[in-house]
Image (tube, helix red, strand yellow):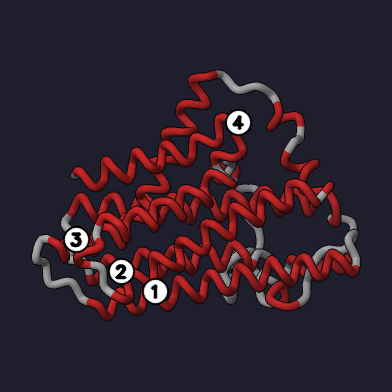
Amino acid sequence: MTYLLVLLAISFAVSAVGWLYFIYFFSIGYGLSISALSLATVVIFWDVITLPAALLCAVLFIYGLRLALYLFVRERRSASYKKILYQPDNTQRKPVFVMFMIWISCALLYIGQISPVTFYLYNALHGAAVDSLWAWIGMAVAALGVLIEIVADAQKSAAKRVNASRFVDTGLYRLVRCPNYFGEVLMWTGSFVICFGACCNVWQWVIASLGYVGIVYVMFSGARRLELRQMETYGNDPEFQKYIHRRPLIIPFLPIYSVAKHTWLKG
């Protein structure tokens, strides 16, 4: 349990950037926390680190650092993003109790997300016959997810430079309306499947599953917010209406075209 307490302390410390502005709990603080936790996992379990586990931690570290820097730069350069980030509902001062609950929830979620690889290494340290094949599979899937997310963000930025007032339906956006969210879901799916080769006990499965389900929920919640914003902006555009009825929201080929009415996804 000591290693989990150490990781939890790191998660709380890094995600505390959210006290500067509460949105940072879920954005910059999220990215930095994942990077810090993946790096700490390598340091803690250095004596038993395997190549696929090290590569998975590297993927998560790069993902988190890249996300934090991307959001930081976008906040300063994009007027439209800044308008969303600092809308009245966000800038309204939150009660201290609410801030604490958000902080605690985020720190715990980030531990759950990073836990599969830590359980894999912890169990290996204690003599469990972990299966490196699942680590290789998880690493490969996670890396593919990060690549998809990077390409999707780049394609959206390029499309917006050409026509800032039009929705994006080129590149990966031809397959799915939120390919960046799909990339993240894929990345965390890759991270989660390492549990199948980690000889996890019941409570380890519970923690890892809660982290995975939690981040998938966050992705669909984010997609819902984006869908509502896009309907306000492009809802009267016939091309947009045709696009959203033909392209799935997050998962390619999975016929989920809208979650706007699912208020339980409200974050």
- Real-space CA distance between mark 3 and mark 2, rounded to the nearest whole angstrom: 10 Å
Crowdedness near tag 2: few (<14), some (14–19) or many (≥20) residues, C-alpha within 10 Å: many
**Marks 1 and 3 close (CB-CB < 8 Å):** no
From the image, tell me which residue sits under label 3.
Answer: 200
* Place of residue 9 in the rendered image (x, y in percent of width and height, measured from the top left): 34, 38
Q: Label 2, secondary structure: give it.
A: helix
Sooner in the amino-acid sequence: mark 3 or mark 4: 4
Q: Which quadrant would the C terminus be assigned to in this image?
A: top right
**Marks 4 and 2 close (CB-CB < 8 Å):** no
Sooner in the amino-acid sequence: mark 3 or mark 2: 2
**Any mark on residue 139, and which?**
1
Q: Label 3, secondary structure: give it.
A: loop
Tell me which residue sits at (67%, 49%) in the image: 72
**Marks 1 and 2 close (CB-CB < 8 Å):** yes
Instruction: Name the residue type under label 1.
Output: Met
Crowdedness near tag 1: few (<14), some (14–19) or many (≥20) residues, C-alpha within 10 Å: many
Residue 260 in view, yes or no: no
- Real-space CA distance between mark 1 and mark 3, rounded to the nearest whole angstrom: 18 Å
- Real-space CA distance between mark 1 and mark 2, rounded to the nearest whole angstrom: 8 Å
Q: Which quadrant would the N terminus be assigned to in this image?
A: top left
Instruction: Name the residue type under label 4.
Output: Leu
From the image, tell me which residue sits under label 4.
Answer: 20
Q: Label 4, secondary structure: give it.
A: loop
**Marks 3 and 2 close (CB-CB < 8 Å):** no
Instruction: Name the residue type under label 3.
Output: Cys
- Real-space CA distance between mark 4 and mark 2, rounded to the nearest whole angstrom: 35 Å
Q: Nearer the viewer, residue 153 or 29?
A: 29
From the image, tell me which residue sits under label 2.
Answer: 194
* Place of residue 189 in the rendered image (x, y in percent of width and height, measured from the top left): 42, 66
Tell me which residue sits at (82%, 48%) in the image: 80
Q: Which of marks 4 and 2 is in front?
A: 4
